[in-house]
Amino acid sequence: MSEDETDGDWFESAVGSEASGDGADQGASDDERPEDDGTSGEEGQDSPFEDGSDGTSDDGEYDSPFEGEEDAASSDGTDSPFEGGDASLGDVEGGAAFDPDDGGSPFGGDDESLFEEDFTDAFASAGGAGGSEFEDEDFESAIPRIDLGIEGLDGMIQGGVPERHLMVAIGSAGTGKTTFGLQFLHHGLERGESCVFITLEQTREAIMATAKDRDWAFDRYAEEDRLAVIDLDPVEMANSLDNIRDELPGLIAEFSADRLVLDSVSLLEMMYDDQAERRTEVYDFTRSLKKAGVTTMLTSEASEDNPYASRHGIIEYLTDAVFVLQYVRSNTQETRLAVEIMKIRDANHSRETNPYEITMDGIDVYRHADIL
C-alpha cells in the first residue's frame, strides 16, 4: 500500500461503500559527362565496334558486335545474342513460353490466362466475398477458456477466450460498449465469479440502475462482496495513476476478482497531450492489469476516421483481443449495428462481420443474418 493514504484508499473505500450500500539522385551534369572521343557515329550515337565503324562490312552485310561469326545467328539464320544461337529467352519444349498460339503460359504452361477468371469469382473463392464459413477447429492450447456471455459472439470464438487475456471493445457512441462490459461481468457473476467494474464516464448509481433495468442482480452481488462498481474521476485517476497502477494487482488479488471491466480507456488516454507519454502510461497500466492475472475487458472510443482503430491508435496493439462494434449504414435501408473480431491471441475465431442488436437482455449477435 502507498504511503499516500489519500490515494491509497481509492479502491478499498469504493469496495467498502458497496458493502454498506453507498454508492532519387540526379544524373551527371553536362560538365561531368565524358568528352566526345570521336568514336560516335554521325548521329552522335556511340558505336559498339572497336574501330568506331557502323558495323557494315564491305559487302554491305551487318557485322555482329559479338566475337565469332556464329554468335550473331543460329543455325537456321535466326538472330540471337546467345552463345551458339540455339536458345532464346522463353524457349521451352514445343515452342515459346509466351506464344499465345501455342497455348504457352508464363505460369506453368496452362492454356488459360491467370486473369481470365472472373475477378468476383476469384475473390469469392479466396473467402473475401460474402465471408466464409467458420471452421470449427480446436486451437491447441492448455490455457483455460471462458465465454463472454454474449450470445452469437461466443459462437464466433472456438473454445472461448483464454483466461487472463486483456481485451478491448472499440466502437463509436451508441454501439453498446458499456453494455458489452456489463454483460461480460454479468455472465461471470452468474457462474459464481467475482468481478470489478471501473467507470470513468458514469456514476456508480447509473451503472447499478442500468443493470437493474435489465434484471441483472448487481445489488445482490455487491452485497455478497462478489461485485465492486467503482466510479473514478478521470482527472483524479490520471493524477494518482502511479499509486493505482502499483496497488491494483494486489487489491484485485485481495478481492479475488476473476473479471474486470474499465469503461473507458479513452478518457485515460486523453489526460496526456504528449503522444510518447500517453503510450508509456497506457502500456504500464495494461501491464499492471496483466500482472494482476484477471481477465480484463476495456472499452475504447473508435477513431473518427477509421471504425477499426481506437481514438489514439494505441490500445489495440497492447491487448490480446479486439472486438469492433460499428454502424453499417445504407442509403436505402435502416442503419444496423455489426460486430467483427479483429484478433484473439491463442484462439481460433470467425472473420465474419455479423449484425447485432441491443435489447433489454443485452447484446444479441445474429450469426446467420445479413448485415443489410
Image (cartoon, helix red, strand yellow):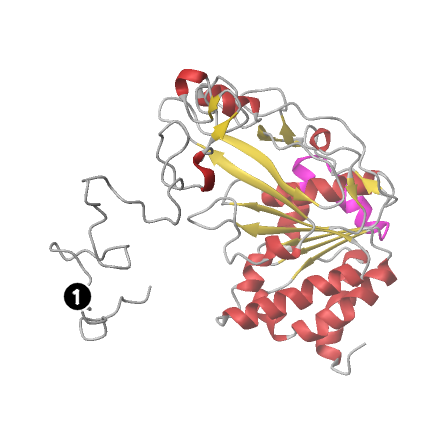
Percent x, y for residue 204? 66, 54
Q: Is residue 274 left or right of residue 216?
A: left
Residue for point 19% across, 45% down: 58
Q: Which residues are magenta?
A: 211-225
Q: Is residue 118 left or right of residue 132?
A: left
Label 1 Cα neighbours within 10 Å, binned few <14 / some 14-19 / many ≥20? few
**The residue positioned farthest toward the bottom in the image shown:** 3
At label 1, the amino acid type is Gly
Examine the structure image and report whether residue 291 is included in the region drawn in magenta: no
Percent x, y for residue 16? 80, 62
**The residue positioned farthest toward the left in the image shown:** 42
Q: Is residue 39 above or below residue 301?
A: below
Query: Element under label 1?
Result: loop
Residue for point 28% across, 59% down: 50
Looking at the picture, tell me which residue is in the foreground, 184 or 107: 107
Residue for point 33% across, 63% down: 24
Q: Is residue 77 above or below residue 280?
A: above
Looking at the picture, tell me which residue is in the foreground, 329 or 34: 34
Q: Quadrant of residue 175?
A: top right
Looking at the picture, tell me which residue is in the foreground, 205 or 235: 235
Percent x, y for residue 308? 52, 45
Looking at the picture, tell me which residue is in the foreground, 80 or 67: 67
Examine the structure image and report whether residue 222 is included in the region drawn in magenta: yes
Q: Is residue 137 left or right of residue 176?
A: right
